[in-house]
Image (tube, helix red, strand yellow):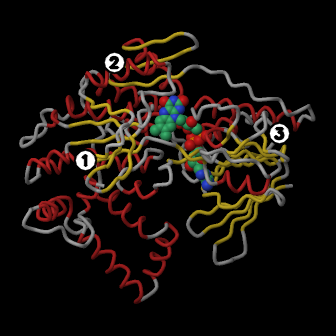
Amino acid sequence: MSTVATHDTQGAAPRRTTLDRPHVLVIGSGFGGLFATQGLRKADVDVTLVSRTTHHLFQPLLYQVATGILSEGDIAPSTREILNRQQNATVLLGDVTEIDLTAKTVTSQVLDRKTTTTYDHLVVAAGAGQSYFGNDQFARFAPGMKSIDDALELRGRIFGAFEMAELAWDEGEEERLLTFVIVGAGPTGVEMAGQIAELSRQTLRRDFRRIDPTRAKVVLVDAAPRVLPGFPEELGEKAHRRLEKMGVDVQLGTMVTDVDRHGIEVKDPDGTKRRIEARAKVWAAGVQGSALGSLLAEQSGAQLDRAGRIQVLPDLSLPGHPEVHVVGDMAALDGLPGVAQVAIQGGQHVAREIRRSLAGEETGVPFRYKDKGSMATISRFSAVASVGKLRFGGFLAWVMWLAVHLLYLVGFKNRITTLLKWTITFIGRGRSERAVTQQQIIARRALEHHSPQDLVHLDDRSDSGPASVDVRDDQEATAGETGGTTGGTMAGLDATVEQQRPDHPEPEGPPSATEEAAHR
Ligand SMILES: Cc1cc2nc3c(=O)[nH]c(=O)nc-3n(C[C@H](O)[C@H](O)[C@H](O)COP(=O)(O)OP(=O)(O)OC[C@H]3O[C@@H](n4cnc5c(N)ncnc54)[C@H](O)[C@@H]3O)c2cc1C
């Protein structure tokens, strides 16, 4: 018999739910977690899916949110809504902080609520984060693209860079603002570079008066010697040629050694170091398995690979724990790639394993991955695809790419809206999702200084007396300084222009909110 017990962090008596049937706990609402849950639809079990987000995110289209083609809702339907007809499934919001393999409990937290859940079977599908190869300080100036927040932040930085360039004082500043550097020439980097190039050459062409957006420089940098290293060589070359035709400066064999607010420092193959001045940078290189992998490794003795992924047995179970399975990006098995199909098929496989176990049948069936091919889009009407021994490039690959992505996008509504927005972008060349809000920028700055938990307690104190006044005053002062709530967007822009005048040294305090969006 399993229980789900929620209590607050102050230690009030927990609210407890008792489950009579075997209980499967799934961590993560990505591809692995969702497909595992759906695979148990008809099983005589209770399934609890706990995830730190309320949505199922279709990561392959994040770059389209960042570049204004799609909205966040188009690629991130509510998990609760997806599973609302699956009667044996319960969705809980929570960031998993502890897993106890001996007690068979998982503890998750959201704001000031902690939930401890016992399980009979555990499926861990917490994915991977961005890796800066030991240089996490780069993240501040070159965000990665793993979440909706990342994509919206990048949207702010990309569109903000054009806005600030229109207000630049001199050509040097304008050039720095109109230079976009993408680090990593894998599929995400190629897609971002292609999209920023199209945005500047097509979408924004007529939108500015002082600057010419088509002059924007897009630089794609990678330490590897070729574009799309995971693809067959001929497709990598095809993508490379196409990017160069679009005006993307592809710099291979180039290692990033430093990143700051104003640009990046790189080392060429001959050891020469040089700088690329650029305010907007995107990090699309390297992944790091979820930190939950370390929790599992410590308790089970399983190995972690260099990318922090946990080594699982051939049936995707954790060594010594047949009741625990790990799927998707955080699992390491036979060099399987970190792609959606591995997570989907892994989730389906463990659902079958659990069903077999419930039926008293033999378990431990090895996971067999069926490679359905890989594809990357470069620009409007151009993509590369590799399916079995077949290689495609150009328009045909692009149509295949559209069809496959529509097929795997969860939810009918999302497919329709995505199709509509693709029509606007690919036929009309417009982009319907160019909005960037002050709230996103201010909230991000607040989160840099406080955890979500801290912010809840700030809010609590604000209801309860004089101490709260200081907190509010402090927050309002910060917002005022950053051109946020009090001055609005234009105040932020004015402040920034003032700061950039050569005869006005850069102030010590925080930069304006608009500048943050444009420059970090
Ligand atoms: C920008 C980008 C583009 C990509 N493009 C492609 C592509 O074109 N084709 C392709 O096949 N693959 C692509 N991928 C890879 C693909 O998206 C992943 O392989 C796939 O999402 C992995 O699924 P997953 O379930 O393992 O992890 P994810 O989809 O990352 O899901 C992890 C889930 O776990 C939750 N979570 C994480 N930590 C915790 C915690 N502590 N507590 C609770 N919940 C937690 C997260 O909120 C999330 O719901 C891309 C990835 C990215 C980032």
- Which is more foreground, mark 2 or mark 1? 1
Answer with the quarter of the image where residue 459 lies.
Answer: bottom left
Q: Are marks 2 and 3 in contact (CB under 8 Å)?
A: no
| SS for dot 1 | loop
Residue 435: image location, x then y, percent: 28, 46
**Disc 2 from disc 1: Cα separation:** 29 Å
| SS for dot 3 | loop
The quarter in which the N terminus is drawn is bottom right
For residue 494, side relative to residue 255 (left or right): left
Task: Tell me which residue sits at (64%, 43%) in the image.
Answer: 330
Task: Tell me which residue sits at (20%, 28%) in the image.
Answer: 202
* Residue type for callout 1: Ala
Q: Please tell me which residue lies in front, 235 or 154.
A: 235
Q: Is residue 437 visible?
A: yes
For residue 462, side relative to residue 373 (left or right): left
* Residue type for callout 2: Phe
- Could you say which disc has been placed on residue 44 in the image? 3
Q: Which residue is mark 1?
A: 278
Residue 403: image location, x then y, percent: 47, 19
Is 140 drawn above or below residue 10 in the view shown?
above
Dot 1: within a 10 Å radius of its alpha carbon, few (fewer than 14), some, or many (20 or more) residues? many
Lower position in the chain sequence, tag 2 or tag 3: 3
Q: Which residue is mark 2?
A: 381
Dot 2: within a 10 Å radius of its alpha carbon, few (fewer than 14), some, or many (20 or more) residues? some
